[in-house]
Amino acid sequence: MALTVPLFAQEQSTFAIWHGLVKDSAGTPLVGAKVRLKGASTGESTTAADGSFSLVALPAGEYKLTIVANGKTATYAQTITLASDSPAALITVSNSRQITVAAQQQTDQKGSEKLSSQKVNELPLNGRDFSTLLLLAAGTMTDANGATNFTQQFAINGQRGVEAVFAMDGADISDPEMGGSTFTNFNVDAIQDLQSSSGWMPAEIGRGAAGFTNIVTRSGQSGFHGSFFEFIRNSALDARNYFDHPSVAEPGRIPPFRRNEFGFTNGGPVVLPHVYDGRGRTFYFGQYQGFRQVLGTTQVLAVPTADERRGQDTVTYPDGSTDTLQVNVNPKIATAFARYPLPNNPTGAYGPRTYSAPSKVDTDADQFSIRIDQTLGAKGQFFGRFNYDNLTGPTTNPDQTLLDPTFGVQYVDRQRNVVFTYTRTESPQFLWSSSLSITRTTPSFPTQNYTDPALKFTDGLYEAFNSAAGSVMSAFGNLFHGQVDFVRTTPQHAVKWGIEARLNRDTTYFGTSPNGEYDFGGGTVYSPVFIPSASGEHNVQVGDPLPDTLSSLLVGYPYGYTIAVAPPYLSNGPHIGPAAINRNDVNVYVQDTWKINRQWELDYGLRYELYTPITERAKRTAGFLDANPPAGVEQEYVINPQPGYQTGWNGWEPRVQVNWNAPQAVRVHAGAAITVIPPNIWQDNSLTGSTPFVIYPRVNATKNGEIAYGFQITPGELPQVYSPEGVSVLASGDTKKVPANTVMDVNRYQEDLAALSPGNQLSLLNLSGIDRRFNNAYLQTWTLGVERAFGRLTADAAYVGTAAFRLPRFSYPNAYQGAGPGFAKYTNFDSDGVATGGFGFESVTTDTSHSSYHALQTSLSGQVGHGGPGLQAGYTWSKSLDDVSGVLGGTGSTGAVSLFSPQNPFDTHAEKGPSNFDVTHAFTLSAAQDMHLQSLGDQPALIRPLTQGWQLLSISTITSGAPFTIYSGIQQTGAGTIGADRPDQIGKPILSTSHSATRRREDYFGLGDANATFFSIPIGIPDGTGPNSGRFGTLGRNSFRGPAYYDFDFAVIKTTPIAHRSNGLERADLQFRGEFFNVFNVVNMGLPANTIKGSGFGVISKTAGTSRQIQFSLKLIY
């Protein structure tokens, strides 16, 4: 007999719908056979004249399969696991009533993947992070720049990382503040299935998902079972990283690395002797996992040389000549210099300024969960689970701790999740399910140092000094998620509909550089003192422009000063910038799978989502009434804007897909969908945490208006906030009493601030807000694919296209810091070009970004031959284009600076180019092979336990390089500076990481100190603008690509039975694992330093992956 079982329900379901066909071993359909499943519920169906049957409305879970035909009963010895996307199964029953089960993989939408518990906890996972398995799916790349919560984020089909949505047992566990997933360190031994979908998805999946992943946890329904495990890592087993260099402080071969992961799982029926016997009704499953790690990461920094600490500045002038200035070092700067280590690697990435050393990073985590499953009568099933996860670490800026341990910023999160689900089967054709979950997350990045200001260098001259400057970024998120789903089936239709609600109730704290920040470089500074030169030909007179960043630093006069400071009636320090944020989401959907006939199937549905605008419970919000008013109309900045932005009522999301079972075992599918992408309540929120609740005064150096290092603005010095009518808006200190849309007299506030600056210099405010027209974004997806089985292998090839529009970005209506007349149109200037009032730097969240993605995605999965390896291979050839790849930028994990601001603040079209996460070619392969050593010849009974149970597993990844942008590191125009100016390209470098007699491997551009000669910075030209008389560069965004990436991870597993039951079945197994990550020790170079005026331009200073690392483990499975 044969049973074919395709599944209609999708990933978020808590139930499955089955249809199939029963045949005997000769392939003849059986009439009147009874197909029975018993487990979480009970289902039975009788086959029709053609052997077909329908078995519906079964909750997802574990079942026993029984088939009764011709008066004979056959029972499958193992447990059948039903999930919402279980593949079709072919079940063969021999004449002796023995049942075998084989999978028939069918894909209803491109990008659907399901990984069983065996695959999840046996494949070699570096860090035992289940989410890394998502990279095996076609079209999934890493979004390094989006990972603000220090967990891996994924760019799926050309979309940003915040659009990857996660659930656990159907309950939303996406990070409500940062994006990505929570509980990524969940114990993989407690995972039953990992279900992932991308591309076309049914109407039941929403929340802006470019990809949806549901983690199905294990239950205790398969009897008493569990495991104990210990995984160990030690640097003594590892290979040296390419950038590991011995030093006086660390003379060892490689930096220290120690990791221990330990824990247990246990589940089964709830049995309390003489009190309660829950066998067959009540089941539990619990798990705990601890994580302890000390990681020494090699850091390569640019630090001051001994000569530079003594005031010697060697300058290269525009005519190519060099001279040395002898500067009297400012005593306060000398104190900061003393806290930098001295260079120790003169041939390193930053030349004589190079310092290389390991920085120790501690990470601790403890997490546990408990799950209860309860059968309630003949029709009801209850499920509850609680997760607890405490994460402390890692340090997010280990380079800074080499200067001072208190400069470190540590990631801390306390994650909790509870979910309750009730499913009721009213009849074989109708069931409903309701679920309620609560998720709390506390992603925070605390720093210990709330005293030292930051010294930052726009051109990358040195490693920044206390770059965090006491910055605060904490979010305490509470997500309440409820849903009710219904399913009705007929022989031809499976209709599902439901309603869902998500309520966000969050508290956040945010402030950038509350210790103060001094910015050196990026603008013109005028010398306050006479500076002699060695030749006497380049002496700097008082009032002359200083020739470079170093001379500005040595005299102690930065180009800019800024600070985050709150008025006395609001909190400062680690609780600066508080906000109590609300956002609600209500949505409904209906979908139907219509089996038109044996060849054709239609999936169609409609979803509607309504997201309320972000609001703040204490009305601590501000923004522009109109950031881009008509000509002749002045901007107005208001407190308590109502509404903050418009409600998006157009939340319709149609979905349709056609499946054709063509001749020759070919399956064709074509689909299209529209998805609403909601605003991220952290990254896209510019309503809270800004003026006048947190003030960011910015003072830039001007002629006769220099800023001395040490200047600061304190909370008690801040002036009162007035309306244009002269009313003190916040006199009571109660923000709730401020009327809606109260206009702030920005000019008066700035004039009062000017009294605090050197020489009463006007300090224009940094103002932010959300454009009133801001709304939801939209994702369009279309797919066309073909699938065919070749024996035990299934091949799939598909075209996948996406287009997203109205994506969020920052816009800059008044140009950048330091912008002059003709660019800063809302700033008032005198005849000398000095700002006298108006508005200063403005950042406004708008929805004007767009992206596109086109890809050929192929896969091959199944088993090779009889007894050959099981494999899953995927290849993607794709192109992802956009004009910005996110809202918040920064330094990615591979070294290059990535800015999310355009070169020209008024021309974003010129930014169109490859996405930051665009990878043209990507190949992945996972394989598992039983070695069958016990079958090699006749073996004595004592030898067989040593030869049986051996298995080899591997994950291999090969990708082309990631794109990066070249920045000049200097203000080129009168539009001001944010660091995004680009040069012209005048030469073509040969990009390579190959070593030769004349080229270091890390010298990606190939000319070492002369790498900048491939480019020309367009300054000092006729008709140029700004202090450097320049123009915008012609080089495009993301014009270059980094080195390719190769990774090969292997695992060897030996499983040995150590006890048996009386019936001969195993009672317990002892499993030994050896895992080898980057087994061939491939040096995967990261991206090079990409700022021309910075240190080490064109040279790579860190790797994109680890060196070879080895992990051993021991696991007891019972």
Image (cartoon, helix red, strand yellow):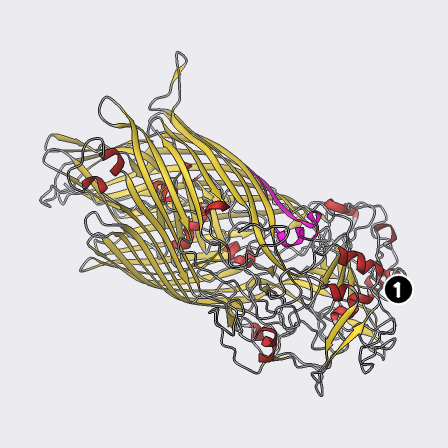
Q: Which of 713 and 906 is in front in this view?
A: 713
* Count of marks overlaid on the render: 1
Q: Where is residue 322, by image quadrant?
A: bottom right
Q: Where is residue 1028, by image quadrant?
A: bottom right
Query: Which span of residues is magenta-colored?
Result: 387-414
Up-down relation of residue 8 to residue 77 (above or below): below
> Farthest bottom residue?
1022
Residue 412 drawn in magenta: yes
Q: Where is residue 1012, by image quadrant?
A: bottom right
Q: Which of 1057 and 762 is in front in this view?
A: 1057
Q: Nearer the viewer, residue 1046 or 917?
A: 1046
**Residue appearing at x 88%, y 71% in the figure:** 529
Q: In which quadrant of the rendered image does the C terminus lie? A: top left
Q: Name the residue under label 1.
A: 758
Residue 355 in the image: x percent, y percent? 64, 59
Up-down relation of residue 1081 to residue 834 (above or below): above
Residue 320 in the image: x percent, y percent? 69, 83
- For mark 1, give the secondary structure: helix
Q: Residue 858: in sight, yes or no? A: yes
- Neighbor class of circle 1 (other Cα within 10 Å; few <14, some 14-19, many 20+) is some
**Residue appearing at x 77%, y 73% in the figure:** 524
Q: Label 1 amino acid?
A: Pro
Residue 152 in the image: x percent, y percent? 51, 51
Q: Is residue 728 left or right of residue 30?
A: right
Residue 329 drawn in magenta: no
Q: In which quadrant of the rendered image does the N terminus lie? A: top left
Q: Residue 634: in sight, yes or no? A: no
Q: In this view, does 434 lie to the left or right of 1090?
A: left
Residue 594 in the image: x percent, y percent? 29, 52
Q: Is residue 633 left or right of residue 109?
A: right
